[in-house]
Amino acid sequence: MKPIITLAGLVLAVASACAHAEPIVIKFSHVVAEDTPKGKGALMFKRLAEERLPGQVRVEVYPNSTLFGDANELEALRNDEVQLLAPSLAKFEQYTKQLQVFDLPFLFDDLDAVDRFQKRSKGRQLLRAMEDKNITGLAYWHNGMKQLSATRMLRQPSDASGLTFRIQPSAVLEAQFGAIGASTQQIPFANVYDALRSGTVQGAENPWSNIFSKKMHTVQPYIIESGHGVVDYMLVSNTRFWMGMPHRVRSELEAIIDEVTFMVNQEAEELNKADRERIRQAGTSEIITLTPEERQRWREAMRPVWKEFEPVIGADIVNAAETVNRKQHN
C-alpha cells in the first residue's frame, strides 16, 4: 500500500528541507585593512546580513588581499570565486570606459557634487555598465577627493611642468598631467612612499587619508588642496550570482547595503577631515589652498582632457556630471 501524504505532512517536509538548506556563502574580498572605512563596511555588511538572514546567508570577509589582490580580484569575481569586491573606480577601465568620468580633472567641484551625480539617473546607470561582463555594481563607496602633493609649490598649472607624478593605471590621469607639462609613472600604492622619498617621482595625487596613512606628507613639502578628482570604490558582485539569489534575500541584502554605504561614506569624510588636521599639525608639509580664480585656471588648463575622452565616456555622462556642480563655470 502506498503511504498517504497529507497536506500537513508535506508542509512539514518542506519546512524541514528549508531549515536544513545550506546558507548562501558570500565571500567579500578587499585589499585594505579592517580599520579603514572600506574594511569597516565589509564587517558591518557581514554582521547585518547574518543577523537579519540567520541561517540563510553566511558572509566571509577577507581583508588585506588575503584571498585575492588588485591584480586578479575582478577575474575571480567574474568566475564566482568571490562574490563581493569594492575596487577603486580606476580598476574598471578594461570593462567599461564610462567610469573614466570620475577621473576627469576638476569636473566635480566637491564631494557633494559627486554624491549628487552618483544618486541621479546617469550615476545609477553606470552601476549597470558592466553587466555584460558579469559584473553588477551595487553601490558607490567614498574614499575622498584627491589633493596634489609635490616637491614644489603648485599655484599655477605651469608650476607642475617638468615634474613626474605617480598615478594609478589610467589613460585619463596620464592625459591630465600631460596637459600641464608633467610626466607620469604608474606605481603600486604600497610603493608610493618609497618612490617619493627616493625622488623617483616628485609628486602624487591622493585623498588626505591616503597621504597621512602612508606618511607621504613627511616626504612632500607641499600639498595643494586641489580637490581635482575623486577616489571612490564601487561595491560589485558577480551578476549571475547576485540575480540568482531568491528575491527576498537579495532585497534584504540591498537594503543592508544602503545602510552600510551611508556609514562608509560618513566614516570616509570624517577620516579625511581628521587626517588633514593631523597633517597640518605635523608641520612637515605646507598646505596650499587655491583661490577660486587659481582653481579655475587649473580647470581650464585641464578641460581639454574632458573633450579628449568624451567620445569613449559619452557626452551625455560628462554633461550630466558637470551640471551637478552648484557653481556656474564659464
Image (cartoon, rainbow, N blue to C red):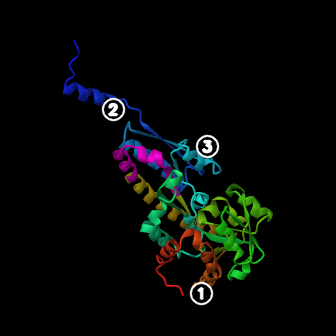
| Amino acid at the residue labelled 1 | Glu
Asked if residue 275 shows in the view, the reply is yes
Q: Position of residue 163 (x, y in %)?
A: 76, 73
Q: 57 or 77: nearer the eye?
A: 77
**Residue 200 rendering spot, x and y as whole percentages:** 79, 64
Identify residue type, mark 3.
Thr
Element marked by disc 2? helix
- Of all residues, the one furthest to the top in this rendering is 1
Q: Residues within 10 Å of mark 1 (few under 14, many from 20)?
A: few
Q: Contact (CB < 8 A) between labels 2 and 1?
A: no
Residue 249 vs 117, above or below: the answer is above
Q: Is residue 304 left or right of residue 21?
A: right
* Disc assigned to residue 18: 2
Q: Label 1, on which residue? A: 293
Q: Quadrant of the C terminus?
A: bottom right
Residue neighbourhood size for the residue with mark 3, other residues' Cα within 10 Å, grouped as few (<14), some (14–19), many (≥20): few
Between label 2 and label 1, give the one nearer the viewer: 2
Q: CA distance from mark 2 to mark 1?
A: 65 Å
Reading the chain from its start, which is encountered first: label 2 or label 1? Answer: 2
Q: Earlier in the sequence, mark 2 or mark 3?
A: 2
Q: CA distance from mark 2 to mark 3?
A: 33 Å
Q: Which residue is mark 3?
A: 66
Span highlighted in magenta in the image: 234-254
Against 46, residue 177 (above or below) is: below
